[in-house]
Amino acid sequence: MADTPKVRAATTSELERAIATITCAFAADPFTRWVWPDAADFLGHFPLVLREFGVHAAANESVYVTEDFGGAALWIPPGVHPNEPALVAIIERSVRGARKDEFLEVFGLMGSYHPEDPHWYLPMIGVDPSRQNQGNGGAILQHALARCDREGLPAYLESSNPMNITLYQRHGFEIMGEIRVADSPLMTPMLRPPR
């Protein structure tokens, strides 16, 4: 049996490398590719979204990566909020047609599920497709959730891929509901109480 991948906090200078890993991981993500079905649009705009989350995670030493960057996650600590106007501006200029309004509606519904009490938020976690099924995602989750537990705080995420639900459930996340607008793929908000 292979060793469990080692996980650490990435430095601010390594943020772009973490973003590249997550971008590769989301290349076939049902929801993300519904937003940007054109490959050039996806590659041109999705990394901008990741940077908006990533700068907050990096400033709080909560960009977690495996040693070889096979997997990466951006965690936002309690009391820190991404720049919502900047995220909406990216959507406004990059999403085409009616899909823009539908995505903005999904975005609003996502916000309605966010806990009001202090919590850690996982907006993005991904494993390079060439490194999947090797324990990278689970190792990153375990590392970050240990911090949540030490601090006695819940963790919240929205799963944009139904295939990942069981991974999150194995780590203690519970489904809060479902988000779907028009023909959008399912988005599943999930919450994990501290242990």
Image (tube, grey):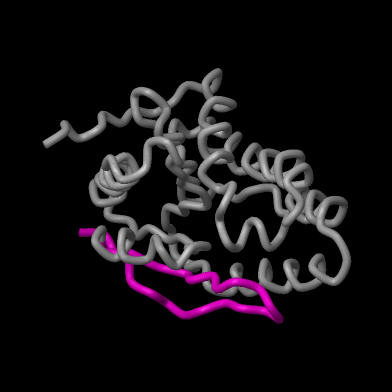
Give the number of marks: 0
Kindly give the residue lying farthest to the left in the view shown. 1
* In front of the other: 97 or 147: 97
The quadrant holding residue 19 is top right
Q: Residue at x 34, y 24 (%)?
A: 67
In screen coordinates, is 195 left or right of 17?
left
Q: Residue at x 51, y 31 (%)?
A: 18
User: Residue 6, how many percent across, how many down?
Assistant: 26, 29
User: Residue 166, how many percent across, how many down?
Assistant: 31, 65
Q: Residue at x 66, y 73 (%)?
A: 184
* In front of the other: 88 or 164: 164
User: Residue 34, how many percent across, how many down?
Assistant: 68, 63
Quarter of the picture holding the N terminus: top left
Determine whether 10 is above or below 41 in the image.
above
Quarter of the picture holding the C terminus: bottom left
User: Residue 31, how many percent across, how many down?
Assistant: 60, 62
Determine whether 67 is above or below 21 in the image.
above
Q: Is residue 180 magenta?
A: yes
The quadrant holding residue 4 is top left
Highlighted range, magenta: 172-195
In screen coordinates, is 161 left or right of 194?
right
Q: Is residue 45 magenta?
A: no
Q: Residue at x 29, y 65 (%)?
A: 169
In screen coordinates, is 64 left or right of 50?
left
The quadrant holding residue 101 is bottom right
Q: Main secondary structure of the magenta part?
A: loop
